Every structure is written in C-alpha cells, then in structure tokens.
Image (cartoon, helix red, strand yellow):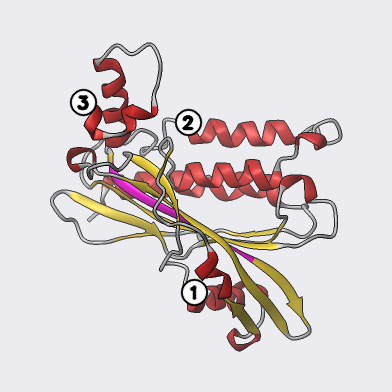
Amino acid sequence: MTIPSYAKLQRYWDGWDSRLKQLISGRNGARLFFPTALQHGEIVDGKITIRPVAPIFIHNAPPKASSSRGKSTRLAIFIAGSFEVSAADEQPCMHKADCNVTFYTCKPEPEGFSLKFFDAMHFDFEAAQSQTAFHPIFHVQRGVSREVSDDTVRDLFQEHLHTSRDKVVINNEQVQDLGTPYLRLPTPQLDMFSVMTLIMADFFCNGGDISQDKQLVPRFRAILDYLRHEANIIREGHGSRTLKGRIEAERAQHMSAAHWYAECT
C-alpha cells in the first residue's frame, strides 16, 4: 500500500543530497554521506513516523566556516531525527518531529580514526494539542542522542571510510561535562531540514569567501529556497500553526518568547 505522505516526503528528501554537496564538496576534504532512503513504522491513529535509514554523516568538517581553509581541528557531524505525519491525507501535516546533532573531533590514525566527543544537542517539538507545562512548543537542549551510539558511528565509518569497526576509537569522557541539559531555549520549527540548513550556514558558508567564491551565496540561497518549497510537506506543522495562532489571536504587534508557552493563552 502506498502511503501518500511517505511517498511525498521521500521525493522531497531526494532533492537534498545534491544541494548540500554543492556547499560541502571541496572544503578541505569534507565529505557528505547522505542516506538515500527513508523508512516508516506502522500507521497508528492515522499517523506514521518517518526517519532516514541511518544518520546523515559529514566527515572532515571544519569547526567553523571561517576555518575551512586552514589546518585545524576537524569534525565528524551526525544528524538524526524523525517526522510524525498524517498517513493518508493528500495534504499531510506534520504533528511532531525531533532532530539531534552530535559532534566529534576526528583525527586520522595510521590504521583508522580516533574520535573525541565534542558536543550534542537535540531539537524538540511539543505536540500542539498537549503541550507540556512550562516547555516552549519548539526548543533546543544540550543532550546526547541514543540514535547516534558508538556502534552506529563505527558502522558509518566502516561503511563509508573503508576502515574496520575496531579501528575507530571513541573517547566519550567529555559527555559528563556537556553542561546543563535542563535549559530549553525557544526556537522556530527546527526539523531535520532546517537543522541541515543551519549546519551549512555555520560550518560551510563564510562571509569572507563571498568575493572569491561567486557561487557561495547562490548555492546557499538554493537551499533556503528548497527549504521553503511547497514540496516540503512538513514546512509548517501543527506546532507552527499553533504558534502563529497565538500571535494572531491577541493581535500582537510583536513576537515574544511568551508565545512559545501554552500558559500565555
């Protein structure tokens, strides 16, 4: 049985790989390994959860966009997440989603790689109909994802970088010093597509390169255009509509962090 929302999201997903590689390729050996397929679970109450078959993996990324030309620390970046959408609607809407990003510093070794945990955060969506008390409807928190386990990291290195799993050494000592996991910072809707856009801006688009690289701005603009494209069936989920409704209901002249909390109504 064909599930309309899954088929539509897969078609839209297929357009990201080439657009991201336009910015990543050539940045001092940075490489993108983008999973081609999405998978979905069973239909429950008319909704399905869709996720990539593996995390997105960026190898040899610079620690910031302006350092992409120098010899500096390099990163391995992993992006994972999911989308909960209506299963059968011809115009499906996203009910909920999650996304997480994990960063490791990465050094090549004679026979493999050594990785050291650097940072991690997750981007959360509260269900619009049952928003948790005192939680912003969209927010980001520091925290490690179970979707990016040591086994997953080793599997990705073995699959894409032609090394064996036992040659990938992972140091997670810094996880315990990550900082407070309890501060929830309000954000816009930051699903996997939005977070990929942030990663491109902050790690692969340097304002100082604009005069030398005439394709930099058009390539990033192409990602922004695709993010807002009507083919993106999750570009405005129930949470975004709820947030807009709160602002419009009080005819607010400004957008306030107060609108992110259910208690404001």
For mark 3, give the secondary structure: loop
Contact, CB < 8 Å: mark 2 with mark 3?
A: no
**Residue 219 location (% of width, % of height):** 67, 36
Residue 224 appears at what percent x and percent y?
56, 33
In-image side of 107 versus 120 (left or right): right
Residue at 73 percent across and 52 percent down: it is 25
Q: Residues within 10 Å of mark 3 (few under 14, many from 20)?
A: few
Marks 2 and 3: which is nearer the front? Answer: 3
Find residue 152 and name its label. 1
| Circle 1: element type | helix
Distance between mark 3 and mark 1 Cα atoms: 42 Å
Main structural element of the magenta stretch: helix, strand or loop? strand
Location of the N terminus (image quadrant): bottom left
Question: Quick one: label 2, few (<14), some, or many (20+) residues within 10 Å?
Answer: some
Position of 56 relative to 107 (above/below): above
Circle 3 sits on which residue? 265
**Residue at position x 76%, y 62% from top?**
73
